[in-house]
Image (cartoon, coloured by chain):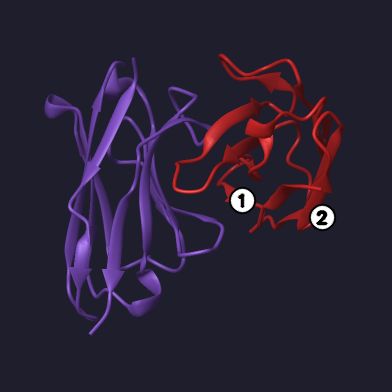
């Protein structure tokens, strides 16, 4: 059974930093592109960042480029999102999701339960 | 960036009826289109990918169609568990989501 478990969310002041983690199990983590998606309260879904199997292939939404860094450690089946210079409008539930394709950007066939990030003074 | 536009924003449907949801892309995405269902307090769940392929375990009441820029999600014989928000997403090059359609009980 595929499982994705996010952690690391919480309350942080504007300008602060947080690191989200997503521990994966039930599939060959190193073989799949992974993605972070966020959802602000009462809003729709926004694709934040994706990372390919090699970690050299990363992509970011314009809204987080230069502030967020996605990474992965295939030895411990874990995806990360380092979030710096956080802003109030980064407040959202952050989901980790597995790609349906082994390579390239694709649909998202499994999602974690989400980790809430609140940016507020 | 490809913009995905869903309509209507809210769809009021009686249980047992059919719901038809639309998703339009600002430029062709071929058949690289997925549909997700999201219930309150839950993560989205994949329903359809490649425009018309049902994901594992998804009821045959859900069907997807379309290609290029126009796509449709049809839900036949709506059940109580189907009242939720539905999002489309393209994955032609990068990926973007539509803003969602809420299917509510009429």
Q: Is residue A120 above or below residue B25?
A: below
Give the residue drawn at x 17%, y 52%: A8
| A75 relative to A64 in the view: left or right | left
Residue B31 locus on image (x, y percent): 74, 31
Which numbered disc, 2 or 1, marks the residue that appears first in the sequence? Answer: 2
Shown colour of chain A: purple
Q: In the picture, residue B2 is in which quadrant? A: bottom right
Q: Nearer the viewer, residue A92 or A98?
A: A92
Q: Quadrant of the N terminus of chain A?
A: top left
> The residue tagged with tag 1: helix, strand or loop?
strand
Give the residue drawn at x 39%, y 42%: A35
Q: Are marks 2 and 1 in contact (CB under 8 Å)?
A: no
Q: Is residue A54 among what the camera can see? A: no
| A70 relative to B82 in the view: left or right | left
- Looking at the picture, do discs 2 and 1 lie on one chain? yes
In front of the other: label 2 or label 1? 2
Q: CA distance from mark 2 to mark 1?
A: 15 Å
């Amino acid at each position: 059974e595929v499982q994705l478990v996010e952690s690391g969310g919480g309350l942080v002041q504007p300008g602060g930093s947080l690191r989200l983690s997503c521990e994966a199990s039930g599939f060959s983590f190193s073989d799949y592109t992974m993605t972070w998606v966020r959802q602000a309260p009462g809003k729709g879904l926004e694709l934040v960042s994706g990372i390919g199997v090699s970690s050299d292939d990363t992509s970011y939404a314009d809204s987080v480029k230069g502030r967020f860094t996605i990474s992965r450690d295939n030895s411990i089946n874990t995806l990360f999102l380092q979030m710096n210079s956080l802003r109030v409008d980064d407040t959202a539930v952050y989901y980790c999701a597995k790609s349906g394709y082994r390579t390239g950007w694709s649909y998202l066939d499994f999602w974690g339960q989400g980790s809430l990030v609140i940016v507020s003074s | 960036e490809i913009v995905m536009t869903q309509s209507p924003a809210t769809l009021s449907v009686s249980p047992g009826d059919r719901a038809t949801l639309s998703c339009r892309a600002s430029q062709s995405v071929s058949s690289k289109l997925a549909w997700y269902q999201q219930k309150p307090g839950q993560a989205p769940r994949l329903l359809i990918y490649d425009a018309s392929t049902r994901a594992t375990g998804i009821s045959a009441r859900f069907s997807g169609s379309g290609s290029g820029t126009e796509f449709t999600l049809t839900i036949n014989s709506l059940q109580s568990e189907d009242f939720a928000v539905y999002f489309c997403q393209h994955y032609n090059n990068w990926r973007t989501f539509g803003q969602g359609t809420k299917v509510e009980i009429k």
